[in-house]
Structures are given as C-alpha cells and as structure tokens.
Amino acid sequence: MSNNYFKIAVLSGDGIGPEIISESIKILDVIAEAFQYKFHFDYGLIGAEAIFKTGNPLPEETLKICKESDAVLFGAIGDPVFDNNPDAKVRPEQGLLKLRKELGLFANIRPLKTYASLIEKSPLKREIIEGADIQIFRELVSGIYFGEKFTDPDGGYAYDVCKYSREDIIPIAHMAFQEAQKRNKKLTLIDKANVLDTSRLWRKICQEIASEYPDVQLDYMFVDNAAMQLILNPKQFDVILTENMFGDIISDEASVIGGSIGLLPSASVGENNALFEPIHGSYPQAKGKGIANPIASILSVAMMLDHLGLQAAANKLRQSVEHAIENKYVTIDLNTKQYYSTSEVGSFIADHIRYSEKSYYNFENVKIGKSTIV
Ligand SMILES: NC(=O)C1=CN([C@@H]2O[C@H](COP(=O)(O)OP(=O)(O)OC[C@H]3O[C@@H](n4cnc5c(N)ncnc54)[C@H](O)[C@@H]3O)[C@@H](O)[C@H]2O)C=CC1
Ligand SMILES: CC(C)CC(=O)C(=O)O
Ligand SMILES: [Mg+2]
C-alpha cells in the first residue's frame, strides 16, 4: 500500500445496498480530490444479486478482489425471496458469513453515539441517553452462526451448534481490553454464563487476560439483563465485549439510543483484511425509494479512512456528517416533517467536505444542494 493510493473492493449487495454505497463512493471521490488520494474501486457481486447472476452468494472473483484490496466497502445483503423460503438451500447471508470467515474478520467494532439534535428522535428519555457513547466489540467468525447446522429431511427437528475455542476469544478480548484502556477503563463482558458452557469459557479467558490490564475494570452482565439495561441506563456501558449472536442483537437494540439504525457504522477487522459495513441489513422495503439513511455507510467510510491511516480525512468526514445532522439535513427515519433523499443527504455531506476543505465559502451562510437548509 503506497501512501496515497488505495485499492478498495466495493460490494454493494442487495436492497438498499447499492443506494447507500453510491453515496459512500460519492464521498470517497470528494475526499480523493480534497486530500489528493487515489482510490481504485473494484466492484464485486455478493448476496442475492450474486446468486441470481452466478448461483453463488460469494463468487471466487469477489473473494479475490477482497483479498487483494486495502479495504472492503460493504453495503448489505438479503432478499425476501430467500427470507420467505425456509427451504432455500443457497442464501445471500451465506455469502457474507463466508466472506467474514475467509478474510479472518474476527472483530466487528460497532460504535454508538448520540447527537444533540437527535436526542428527541429516540423513544428514550433525554436524561437516559444524552451523552451515551458505547463501543461494542462483537466476535464475528465463530459461535452459533458458524457451527454445524442440520435440518432433519422430514422437517421434524433442526439444530445449530454454538462452539468457541480459546483461539477465537483471545484476540478480540485483547482488542476490547486495549480499547477500554484508551477510553474509560471499563469493559463489560455480555454473556449467558449462567447457562452456556461457551459463555463460561469467555468469562474464564477474560478473567485470565484481565491480569494484563490491571487498570481496566472488568464487569460481567447476562445478555437478557443487558438487553434491558442498554435501554434503561445505557450510560453505565463504555466498552462492551460479546460473542457473535449476542453482539448482533444488542447492537441493533443499541441503535435506538442514537435515533436510527441508519446511523450506525461498523468495522470488521482481522490480521490481514478489513471490511467496513453499516450494522443494518438490506431494508428491502426501501429499495429504490431513495429513503434509506446513507449515514451508517458513510460513517463506515470514516472508519475505513482511520484504518488506512487517513485520520485528517476521517475527521473531516465525521465533522461533515455532524454538520448535516445538526442542520437537520437528514432522511425520513430521523425527521418525518422535513426530510431529504438518500442522495441529497450524501451530496450535502460531500459538498461540505469539498467546500470547507477548499475554503470556498463560509459554511454558516451557504445553501447547498437542491434544498434549502431551514
Ligand atoms: N449485514 C447485512 O448485510 C445484514 C443483512 N440482513 C438482511 O437484510 C434483510 C432485511 O432484514 P431486517 O431484519 O429487516 O433488517 P434491516 O436492518 O434491513 O431493517 C430493519 C429496519 O431497520 C430500519 N433500517 C435499516 N436500514 C436503514 C437505513 N439505512 N435507513 C433507515 N432505516 C433503516 C428500517 O426501519 C427497517 O425496517 C434480511 O434479508 C436480512 O437477512 C440483516 C442484517 C444485516
Ligand atoms: C449474516 C448477517 C445477516 C448477520 C447480521 O445481522 C449482522 O452482521 O448484522
Ligand atoms: Mg445484524
């Protein structure tokens, strides 16, 4: 990887995937211009569109461009054709799971924050959520999503095995402890250790590792209680560490604190590869309507820029997203009275980066894009 040339594999996927990814590419084009970087995009098929075109949810060619990339930008996969057919043998989700496994993306980092102007959008009370700031570390390539699966041909029973090894837990546990050290020195392991052997293994290993981080306070919480505590008192959490399925579920729940799942980005990282993806899915009901919030994908681009060592660009991008949110330049999920389309929000953020980087305008007084800031 040279200092200013980056190969990005782009997997738009299904549903709203292509719409949100096209806003993220718009942003990357502007960042390339403003900061003098070159991003080379290699597009690949994945998910339902890949099944429809090739029969395979993760074609070899897609895997190849991802492995050869500096980073992967991922939209979303999933289609009702498969969701509504429990007998389908090939499924879009298998493409994403296989990609995560093949790239060794063991840690999925899902940051959650609140924005002052969106506090009222959350169904939760201001005093409960204001200032909440949580970093979720979700294990991503093991556990029940990857264990042996079986369905009795007569349809009488089925099972999914949940398996964890020391090797699966240690790397992400260290990552979470190190993040806790950089933040408020508080780590909560969310598990079900009162019932599950796998959870007891997580506790044991985290207790062992804790001795290497004596300044970090390690707490435990059962996942059922955590699901309740997250919305009753989210500010008690700082860094959360959890297994694959629990992390999947509680992070969607946590998005209610921020105001919309359409705001939450994530980074999926491993030893040699990294992939950046919103936490939401393909939201098929919104496909082609221009109503999807592109910010989760755009903030995933900010995480990608951090990963590539382009902190100045990442910070500028986050400032521009905040500028859009604070100026109420948002999609319908965040404001049903005054809202903008997916591409208008993307353009507003892109314009803010472009003009503020070039110091063309005083931004407090300028009208950007098709609509007026009111
Ligand atoms: N990483 C991925 O690609 C994921 C894929 N999926 C797949 O997505 C499909 C739909 O699954 P759902 O459970 O409905 O989850 P979903 O995350 O696609 O949508 C759930 C709800 O969240 C809201 N939402 C999601 N994204 C949004 C956005 N960008 N802007 C505004 N609102 C947004 C909508 O209200 C939507 O009804 C399924 O096929 C599922 O398997 C689900 C989760 C993750
Ligand atoms: C395989 C995916 C559909 C899992 C998921 O929901 C997620 O990663 O958020
Ligand atoms: Mg999910």
Image (cartoon, rainbow, N blue to C red):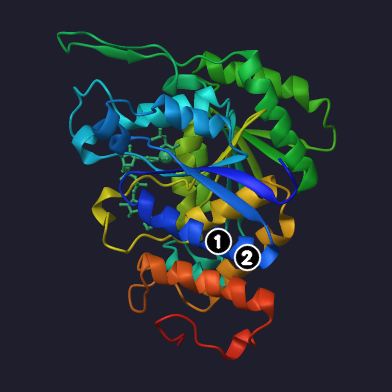
Marks 1 and 2, how far apart at CA = 6 Å
What residue lies at 49% left-to-right and 53% top-to-bottom? 297
CB of mark 1 near ligand 1 (< 8 Å): no
Q: Are marks 1 and 2 in contact (CB under 8 Å)?
A: yes
**Identity of the residue furthest to the top in this view:** 153
Crowd band around label 2 with a 10 angstrom C-alpha radius: few (<14), some (14–19), many (20+): few
User: Which residue carries the number 1 mark?
Assistant: 29
Disc 2 target residue? 33
- The residue shown at (49%, 21%) is 143
Q: Amino acid at mark 2?
A: Glu
Query: From what the image shows, is residue 99 above or below residue 25?
Result: above
- Residue 114 location, x and y as percent? 56, 62
Q: Farthest bottom residue?
A: 365
Image position of 324 with respect to 110: above or below: below
Disc 2, SS: helix
Frontmost residue, 10 versus 372? 10
Q: Quadrant of residue 341?
A: bottom left
Residue 158 appears in the rendering: yes
